[in-house]
Amino acid sequence: MEEQRIPAGGQLLITAAAFVIVVAGMREAQSLLVPFLLSVFIAIIVAPALSYLKSHRVPTAIAIILIILGIAAAGTLVGGLVGGSVDDFSAQLPTYQEKLRTLTLGLQQWFGEWGVQISAASVSRLLDPARAMGMAAQGLSSLSGLLTNAFLILLTVVFLLFESTDLPAKLRLILKDPERSYAHLNRVVEDIKRYMAIKSATSLLTGVLVGLMLTLIGVDYPLLWGVVAFFLNYVPNIGSLIAAIPAILLALVQLGSGAALWATAGYLIINNLVGNLIEPRFMGKGLGLSSLVVFLSLVFWGWVLGTIGMFLSVPLTMTLKIALDSREDTRWIAVLLGPHLTDSDPPAPTAPRSHDTPR
């Protein structure tokens, strides 16, 4: 009996339908998927520490216990230092919002003196700084709510680290071409490790510089805004902007327009120094993505997985790009996802073809 082939248009529709079903399932399973993905990326980040301890003849169980204790200690320290600032800021939020409304009305009257009439309703609808302060408090609350899953995340990390010691041997048993397939998988993991390590280091640098800058200016809760800058630096393109808005508004309310201008200048200098000079120098083009792809992945993964999806948008998209680049028939998609190519850039190598098997 002759085998019937599905037309190209039919294959496209089937692929699109499968994609929609998978995305819908991921969004419905968000409460389970987000802690698991966080656990996977935490396990990838701490895997070099596990390898280092094992290379120094530390038993696997003891090494994992030491790593988990380190993660728990770091989380407890940050939570203890920032928790009081979050509660104090939330308690003072109505006062800050009222001061911002007063400043907005004063700005409206100043425009009126120059003959520019601005409706109060329009200002409140289009530009409400007090709402930005409220959104900042809501975002802090949502991030702190993630701590309720801390035990589940740490427990999953423990099992992932234990499993990682046996995974290479298992993969070599089940894969048809063990060496080639395992080398490709190892490349994916190493690229993600490299990205997360560089991003974590630059985010830490950003947070420290922001905290020091706001301390010098005299803005309240500099440690809190430094931690916010650290976490939001993982969000590409707009994360640093979102982190700057509440701190600048607080500087305006607390110290006046001069301090707000200094804070704005400080954020611009820090973000350009870290984001445009330091990070690209170490990141290179190997982990590059198109600016449009970065923004679209931010929107897509944020919609599918919520706030944590925005933090993981680039690692998830990068993993997809590397997987697509490994196949000849999907490599063109990986090229489209990559960064802008200049005339001096050499053509990317084609993916290796698998050996033809006799039919």
Image: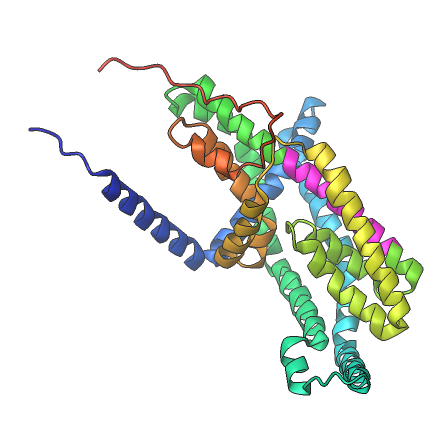
Whether residue 118 is in magenta: the answer is no
Query: Residue at 54% of width from left, 59% of height from top?
Result: 306
Q: Is residue 96 left or right of residue 212?
A: left
Q: Nearer the viewer, residue 69 or 83?
A: 83
Looking at the image, the residue that sits furthest to the front is: 115
If the image is split into quadrants, where does the C terminus sit? top left
Using the image, determine if residue 185 lies above or below residue 134.
Answer: above
Question: Is residue 210 shown in magenta?
Answer: yes
The image shows residue 114 at horizontal and vertical percentages of 81, 83
- Left or right, 75 with respect to 142, comes to right
Q: Is residue 175 above or below residue 101?
A: above
Which residue appears farthest toward the left when viewing the image? 1
Residue shown at 72%/33% (left/top)? 282
Q: Position of residue 259 (x, y in %)?
A: 89, 66
| Along the viewing direction, whichever of 334 and 203 lies nearer the viewer | 334
Instruction: Judge by depth and name the residue closer to the eye, 70 or 108.
Output: 108
Left or right, 231 with respect to 110, comes to left
Residue at the image position 75 percent from the left and 49 percent from the top: 74
- Observer able to see residue 101: yes
- Which residue is at a point 79% across and 65% down the rendered structure image? 247
Residue 10, x across and y down, in percent:
23, 43
Residue 81 in sight in this render: no
Majority secondary structure in the magenta region? helix
Give x and y (percent) for residue 24. Answer: 39, 56
Q: Quadrant of residue 86?
A: bottom right
Picture layout, residue 13 above or below residue 340 = below
Magenta region: 194-212
111 and 77: which one is in front? 111
Q: How many labels were placed on the picture? A: 0
Pick the quarter of the image with the N terminus. Answer: top left
